[in-house]
Amino acid sequence: MAGSFFKWIRKYYNIFIHSIGFLPAALGLLFLLIAIGTMELDAVGWGIELNERFKWLTLEDAETARTIVSTVATSIISLTVFSFSMVMVLMNQAASQMSNRMLDNIIGDKTQKLILSFYVGTIVYSLFLLINISESENQTLVPAISVYFLLLLTITDIFFFIYFLHYITQSFRYEQLIQRIHMRATDTLEGLDRNTNAAIATGNETGGKEILSQESGYYQGFDEKRLLSFTEAHGLVIRFLHPVGTYILKGTPFLAITGNVEEQDLKKILLEIDFYYGQEIDKNAYYGFFHLTEVAVKALSPGINDPGTAVLCIHALTDLFSRIIQQPITAEIKDGQGKTRIVTRQFSVEELFDRSVLPVWDYGKNDRTVKQALIRMLNQLMFIDEESRYKGFLSDKLRELEADKDT
């Protein structure tokens, strides 16, 4: 039961955290708490003392306060709608001109989400304040501190909107979006290099008892800490047969286990493995390669015909390949005693090249600019391959490309 709960948490945590509504909801709740705090300060008389100390602060009428708050709320709602509309237009343009994969990069932009969330927080603050301004024969509540704080928020929103206009025009150009994919994949690769102490392994060897997949879907990884602890406690070695991101059909071989494993233990193991839709570059660097490929292929389609964008993708792919050539993605996870417990399946450089570069090659072989970029890519990768692990493969690809160039 506990394992099933943790699996549910892992699955929906990523969906929730990366959704466009998470940060606005969080800041909306924060601003609601701030509104309650400022109202409490007004309730104990701090607003009256503030008006008495600073004579130029003359907010003493409930009707005036209500007008100010309602005006601010209406204005910020209009500002938010306009800003969201700009984002939607950019998303539609990126999806039609580049790839649907770019939508995640636009929605996931932290600066944009923070600004829009601040707008939402201001709206929540003002609406809560509006319903708490009361006026009766016995008592009049004029939350002066709360209204003054709302005015400060409004001024901040205006400056945020000016910055938002500048940011959205500069940061959502094609080269910036491509760079964003590149940097996210780079950060993921660096995180893998820092977090593992295992040997390199990319082969297809299995060993042990093959286990069939219990469900169909995209294999998205596993809870490393819990699975490692379980295998160490039971003396097991698990080998995954497919790279992360692979679509697995129910009833096909998925992993192999070495050691004595009971049916109930197998169920616990499968609970630590995640299947869900989505391509999060922050969790799987391979998605960065594939997204760049999709953008490049879309740019080379007859309807778009933008080889410049494809060349930018090739440059980004060149850097990513240089990183895995110089420091390949490790595949073994060891326990505290240094014994290998989990072996993951990684794409070899050859496999990754075939999946991410050859499609661009096929679409751009008749474009001189693209062919020159690919030739330069291969020459650069051969130069940085100091251990000559892939020079033979890269040399063969270079000869093939030059042969295509001559025809």
Image: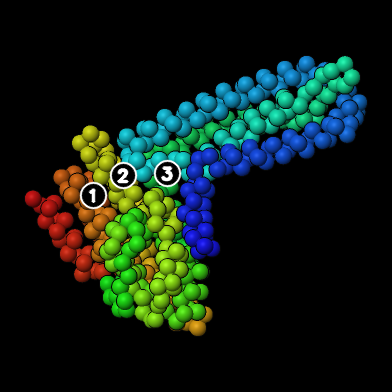
x and y, in percent, of residue 340 in the image: 42, 79
Q: Amino acid at mark 1?
A: Val
User: Which amino acid does the dot numbered 3 rest on?
Assistant: Asp
Classify 291 as above or below 112: below
Q: Image quadrant of residue 395?
A: bottom left
Distance CA(mark 1)–CA(mark 3): 22 Å
Colouring convention used in this rendered image of the protein: rainbow
Q: Is residue 265 visible?
A: yes
Judged from the image, the secondary structure of the residue bearing numbered disc 2 is helix
Residue 200 visible somewhere in the drawing: no
- Name the front one of labels 2 and 3: 3
Q: Residues within 10 Å of mark 2 (few under 14, many from 20)?
A: many
| Residue at numbered disc 2 | 295
Q: Are marks 1 and 3 in contact (CB under 8 Å)?
A: no
Q: Is residue 72 above or below residue 103?
A: above
- Earlier in the chain: of badge 1 and badge 3, it is 3
Mark 1 or mark 3, which is nearer to you?
3
**Front-lying residue, 330 or 343:** 343
Residue under label 3? 104
